[in-house]
Each structure stands twice: as structure tokens, then as C-alpha cells.
Image (spheres, rainbow, N blue to C red):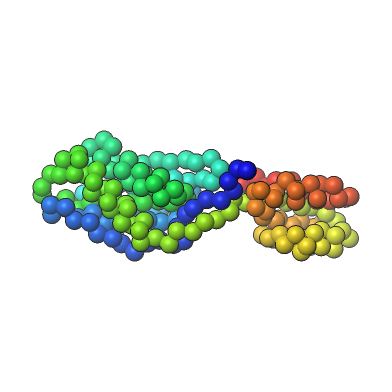
Amino acid sequence: MENDTYKTILEPTTEVLYKEKNSKFYGYAFPVENENQVKEIIERLKKQHHTARHWCYAYQLGTQTLYHRYNDDGEPSNSAGAPIYGQIQSFNLTNILIVVVRYFGGVKLGVGGLIVAYRESAKMALEEAAIIEKTININYLIKFDYKNMNRVMRVVKEKNIDVVNQKFELACEVEISVRKKNAETIFDIFDTMYEILIKEKEL
């Protein structure tokens, strides 16, 4: 049985601070759904820490297909972004962004020192986080005439299906969200109903 849950964090974490040879590393973790949110958060942190030297980050998005990126932001290659991303992997999280902001303290740390500092800052941020498990859901749109509303809503109630949106006019439309492992069964119930149309919603 394929897994239909994923782990992410509930809310942004409070700032953590890791110090090494006068350099300060501020670590943050944020739940994110898309790259626009990633950009907004990084821009906000750059304003907040406008005198910092580096804003390094890693993020992972997606539930069934995972997509990740990381950025060393001027630090030596793979000394910042990759160790941050490594912590996302070791905590097995997705839909998450971790940013570590560095204030240079005048003493070079070397690649090894940087890897440790960025890794530890990311780990400290995640240790502050409330990690939650969510189900992977598929959304369907069900279309029907008003006269069939009771039939549709009876199934929704019996099967305890989450309704995301609904409009009841002459032509009705209900958007439902179904846990992935139950999705096929629910789809088939509506699909075999007379005068009811169901299709998966494009995200």
C-alpha cells in the first residue's frame, strides 16, 4: 500500500541562533506551499537582516512528486544549502523552507566549519518546529442538477467526505477533498450515479 501521508511543520518557528568564531547564524523554518511564498519569505528576511552577509536556504515542495532547491548565496559551493537540505531529508519533511542568515564575524570558518554551522542551525530550527503529519488528498468536482442534490449530499454525509466548496443553483457544483487511498472508491460511487458528473480537479 503506497503511503498517503506526509510530514511538514505546523507554523513558522521562532528564531534560533548558532554561534561559531564570532559568526552568527540565525535559523528559521517555515511551512510553504509554493515558490512564491519562498521568495516572499526570503525577501522579508533580507529586509529584517539587511546587514547580514549571507541568506542561505533550502526548500522542498510537493507530496507525491517532490521538488527541492537549495542556495549557498555566496558561501563556498555546497557548504550551506546542501547541509540545510540534508536536515529537511533527515527529518523527512516537505512543503518546508529553512533559511539560515549569517553575520560574518571576521574569522573564516573554512568549508568544514561552514557545513557544521549551517547543518546545526537548520537542525536547531527544526527541533523548535511542531512537526505534523497530513494526508495526501485528491480534490474532485461533482456537477449535477439541483434535483439530484440530496443524492449527492447523502453520499457526502455517509462517507464523511470533506466539502471544500459548494454552489447550489440550478446547476450545482460541489468540490470535495478525499484522502488518496480512498479516492478511487469515492470516485466510482459518484461516477456510477445517474446524471452526476465527477472529475478530478486540476491543481
Q: Is residue 105 left or right of residue 72?
A: left
Image coords of residue 123 (percent x, y): 32, 53
The quadrant holding residue 150 is: bottom right
* Image mark count: 0
| Residue 46 visible in image | no
Q: Residue at x 43, y 41 (%)?
A: 68
Q: Residue furthest front?
A: 1
Q: Nearer the viewer, residue 130 or 101?
A: 130
Q: Is residue 42 placed above or below 11 in the rendered structure?
A: above
Q: Is residue 1 left or right of residue 57?
A: right
Q: Residue furthest left?
A: 107
Image coords of residue 12 (percent x, y): 40, 61
| Residue 203 visible in image | yes
Q: Residue at x 69, y 50 (%)?
A: 182
What quarter of the picture does the N terminus occupy? top right
Q: Nearer the viewer, residue 126 or 152?
A: 126
Image coords of residue 166 (percent x, y): 72, 61
Q: Residue at x 26, y 56 (%)?
A: 26
The quadrant holding residue 158 is: bottom right
Image coords of residue 135 (percent x, y): 58, 54
Q: Residue at x 72, y 62 (%)?
A: 160
Q: Is residue 18 placed above or below 61 in the rendered structure?
A: below
